[in-house]
Amino acid sequence: MVMWNFEEREGKGGSSREKKRYTPFEMATIVERMSAFNTSKSPRDYGSGEYFNPVEVHMASYIADNPGISATTVARDWNRTKGAVSQIIKKLEEKGVICREKEQGNDKTICLYVTEKGARLDELHREYDTRNYERFLDVLENYFSEEDIQKTFAVLDAWIELSMNWEPS
């Protein structure tokens, strides 16, 4: 079900979306819907024969990108509670995707690393997302220019960074 309600017009690169001015509430709704969609708990097979939900696989990739990171830092970077992150880490550890090691010279700090299995899952996940997002972007380019899409992602990236420290009134 497509919930788009916009008129198409001919322009550079095919049809494009009429400009619409979004209210702050509409913007918040769009961001919340996007967040809900991207944190879906629906497990999928990324090519390893095992099922992982998107949060698990993205956290495994984050740990692969940041070897030795602590759960506390993951929680801060992802704007989640330490308890929520610990639950995901426990699942990933039980599935053999990550391992914990004490930091050298500091028995208090536990560092996270991907295992061989985790490195393979990370690779498969990147291939899966690349393949699927390329297909989705091909469809999106029927409505928006590549420049518009790149600007949107630049705004979303800044949005995430700024909102990490934003205190709503």
Image (cartoon, rainbow, N blue to C red):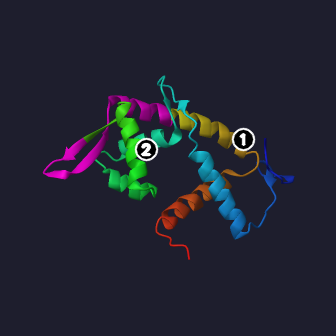
Q: Is residue 115 magenta?
A: yes
Q: Quadrant of the N terminus?
A: top right
Classify mark 1: helix, strand or loop. helix
Q: 21 or 115: nearer the eye?
A: 115
Q: Magenta stretch?
A: 101-126
Quick check: marks 1 and 2 in contact, CB under 8 Å?
no
Question: Is residue 147 something that shows in the picture?
Answer: no
Using the image, determine if residue 91 lies above or below residue 158: above
Q: Residue at x 78, y 52 (%)?
A: 12
Residue 66's x, y, as percent?
34, 47
Q: Residue at label 2? A: 59
Identity, as a three-letter code, of the amino acid under mark 2: Met
Q: Which mark is residue 148?
A: none
Q: Residue at label 1? A: 139
Q: Find the residue positioned furthest to the left.
A: 105
Q: Residue at x 45, y 55 (%)?
A: 78
For marks 1 and 2, give the one nearer the viewer.
Answer: 2
For the residues marked 1 and 2, what is the alpha-carbon distance in whole angstroms? 28 Å
Q: Quadrant of the C terminus?
A: bottom right
Residue 29's x, y, as percent?
68, 60
Mark 2 crowdedness (10 Å alpha carbons): few <14, some 14-19, many ≥20: some
Classify mark 2: helix, strand or loop. helix
Q: 17 or 124: nearer the eye?
A: 124
Q: Residue at x 36, y 28 (%)?
A: 117
| Left or right: 168, with 73 as reference point | right
Using the image, determine if residue 43 lies above or below residue 77: above
Identity, as a three-letter code, of the amino acid under mark 1: Val
